Amino acid sequence: MAGSRKADIAKTPAGQKNSRKSRILIVSGLSGSGKTVALRAVEDSGFYCVDNIPVSLISSLIDKISRQSGSRHIAIGIDIREKEFLGNINAAVALLRKKFPLQILYLEAEPEILVRRFKETRRPHPLGGSLEEAIMIEKKVLAGLKSNADRVIDTSTLSPHELRKLVTSLYAPQAGHKDLAVSVISFGFKYGIPQNIDLLFDVRFLPNPHFIPGLRELTGKDKKVSDFVFSQPVTKQFMKKIKDLLGFLIPHYIREGKSYISIAIGCTGGRHRSPAIVEELARFLSKENLDRHIIHRDI
């Protein structure tokens, strides 16, 4: 999921040169959720990056970097390793927002995904001990940063490449700026609902290609399955309604200041109906000034 809140950069104190064009980004989140990938993505996009410093030192560090390097884009990584400095994070962030055009990006993932990632890399959790217990403690310690975040992104279904692409699209200075980044996700209800989704649609009411000979082993990305799904009158009605809804919602999201939304389409197994719908929605959204990301979680 990603929620967004429009950063108040219009109230930067007078005398801070080029402040409206500056970007100060704090990157934080749960261990294993992709903070290093995100930091590298913004560094390659032109940010001066510093990782793992106490919150109390951020203000003086930004001033020093700005004087020495002239950089107007600075990204700072904060994580559980600085837990002794996170107790007063809400007040610290409030002070930083008064002085700088600050944004906070917070990354998270479902607990079972984090456990799997740690086991795959064979790296210990920074807090040590049981992985499950460490993840629960970390979520509590970082709750203040999450509550202050301008964007919260659930990376459970994202590969490192997909996360890098998404972060770059959100923060890289680009001439061809997109109004909104949209992730469209297909999934199967039998494997659980993706977390932190902005819009979720259940398409289990559509006729299921799983029971059609010759289609079961294919996916919704295959033309034969897609042709079957969209040959159904009920699918045509549904697509008209969902396109009308998105055509109404997206301009309002943009005006409200959102820069990222996630749309999830679910069927029973996430293999046939929902991927076919997601592919068609992606084609529909390509007509708008949107940065689209397609994720088929369960195929």
Image: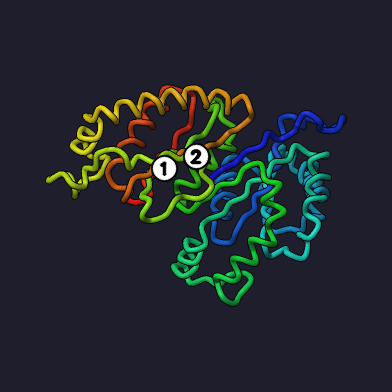
As drawn, 113 above or below 187: below
Local crowd size for mark 2, using a 10 Å CA cut-off: few (<14), some (14–19), many (≥20): many
Residue 27 screen position, x and y as percent = 64, 50
Q: Which amino acid, mark 2? A: Ser
As drawn, 160 above or below 121: above
Of labels 2 and 1, earlier in sequence is: 1
**Relative to 279, is 6 on the left or the right?**
right
Identity of the residue drawn at 71% across and 30% down: 21
Judging from the image, the colouring scheme is: rainbow
What residue does disc 1 label?
A: 185
Residue 58 screen position, x and y as percent = 78, 51
Instruction: Report the number of discs.
Output: 2
As drawn, 21 above or below 262: above
Q: Which amino acid, mark 1? A: Ile
What residue does disc 2 label?
A: 262
**Relative to 199, is 6 on the left or the right?**
right
Q: Which sits in the foreground, 117 or 19? A: 117
* Displayed quadrant of residue 12: top right
State yes or no: discs 2 and 1 in contact (Cβ < 8 Å): yes
Residue 1 screen position, x and y as percent = 53, 45
Q: Which sits in the foreground, 57 or 150? A: 150
- Please, what secondary structure does the residue beneath circle 1 have? strand
**Relative to 22, is 35 on the left or the right?**
left
Residue 201 screen position, x and y as percent = 42, 39
**Relative to 172, is 113 on the left or the right?**
left
What is the spatial separation of the Cα atoms under label 2 and label 1, in whole angstroms?
Answer: 7 Å
